[in-house]
Amino acid sequence: MLQKSVVDLPLHSGKCPPWLFERMVRLSRAIFIVILEEFGKKELLKRLADPFWFQALGCLLGFDWHSSGLTTTVGGAVKEALAPFFKEIGLFICGGKGKRALQTPSEIETYAEKSGLSEASQNLITISRLVARVDNNAIQDGFQLYFHLFIFTDDGSWAVIQQGMDEKSLYARRYHWYSEKILSFTIEPHSGILSNVKKDEVLNLVAKESESVQQAMLNLLHQPLLNVLKEVKVGERLLFTRDHAIRPEFLPAEVLPKIWLKIYENPPQTFEDLLLVKGMGAKHLRALTLTAELIYGVSASRKDPVHYAYAHGGKDGHPYRINKRLYDATIQELESIIERIKLGDQEKLNLLRKLPTLFNRIF
């Protein structure tokens, strides 16, 4: 199980210089090849899905160790590093930042066809859409997604790395998913969430505590709209959350007819179905949540699900300036090991395996 430890990640400004990005690609490629040789693609997928391992990778690659740019830049470097070997290793990386995120479905379809997963491509695309809906709409924490990386293997395993931005505070939050850890897409599905800030109150519809609300919302959508509106308009009823009351006039009753119109022909049977309804955004889910709480006497979780989450320095000079000579030496050494592995020389690989023990003795 992932430990719920804490890391503060204040934002830093600035772009990744080309000389550093090129090195990040080369070093990450060398690291991944060693992992693939030693443990295989499933282990690499698992590590990328671990928010703390991914953070450590960014630190090793020399990017800002506590910056939102770590996610997007390292994600881009990882994709570029492995792209020439996708078909060979049976691991594919789709999406990215901004417009690249919108290309995820078409990239999944293309790579699935190349890997013999054509029949599974639509399911993978649905998963990509669903996890985005969960993090953008079902968890209403003020962070709007702008980065979506979907990673899958030719055996159908997958991982997702997403990041959202709070435009008011200019802080970022990263969400990780891993197929092997998911028992439900709508009940505590994440392998981890890292953020720079913890919020006092967040509407979290995929918390265990919100399970009764999910069912109440589905029950609500199978009721006649007029009956629901009568309940919402009861003037004397108040709904209390942890620290304030939601008065009936706060309930966006004008949104409810639009929701019923969307689901009229095919009411959702599961909460997953509800999240995937076209046009079912955060505002619609919030209206349904408040209405279900009022009518059924249930309560959704308002707890922030975030898990508060160094080697070559960082591009901004923290904890110290990047030593290019040391960086290049690390790349050359790893690339040399990879070449020797190809030639059947295990001596250097055996030394590499002992590095963690040696470092523990030193530190």
Image (tube, rainbow, N blue to C red):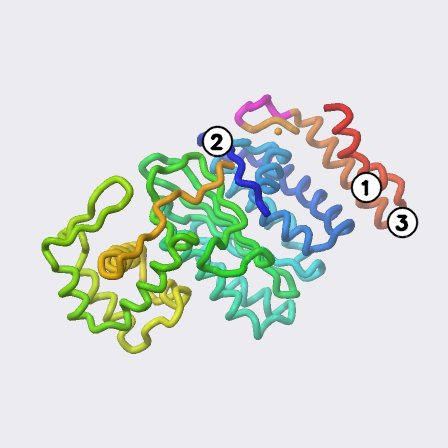
Residue 145 location (% of width, % of height): 41, 49
Q: Position of residue 65 (x, y in %)?
A: 55, 31
Q: Which residue is mark 3?
A: 344
In the image, which residues are magenta? 316-322
User: Disc 1 designates what residue?
Assistant: 337
Q: Main secondary structure of the magenta part?
A: loop
Tell me how far mark 2 sits from mark 1, CA to CA: 35 Å
Which residue is label 2 attached to? Answer: 8
As shown in the figure, which amino acid type bears the numbered disc 2?
Asp
Specify the amino acid type for callout 3.
Gly
Tell me which residue sits at (21%, 50%) in the image: 239
Location of residue 96 in the rendering, given as x and y in whole percent from the top left corner: 50, 51
Residue 337 image position (x, y, % from top left): 81, 41
Residue at (73%, 33%) from the top-left corner?
330
Q: Nearer the viewer, mark 2 or mark 1?
A: 2
The answer to whether residue 132 is above or below residue 269 is above
List the single residue furthest toward the front: 297
Secondary structure state at the residue bearing disc 3: loop
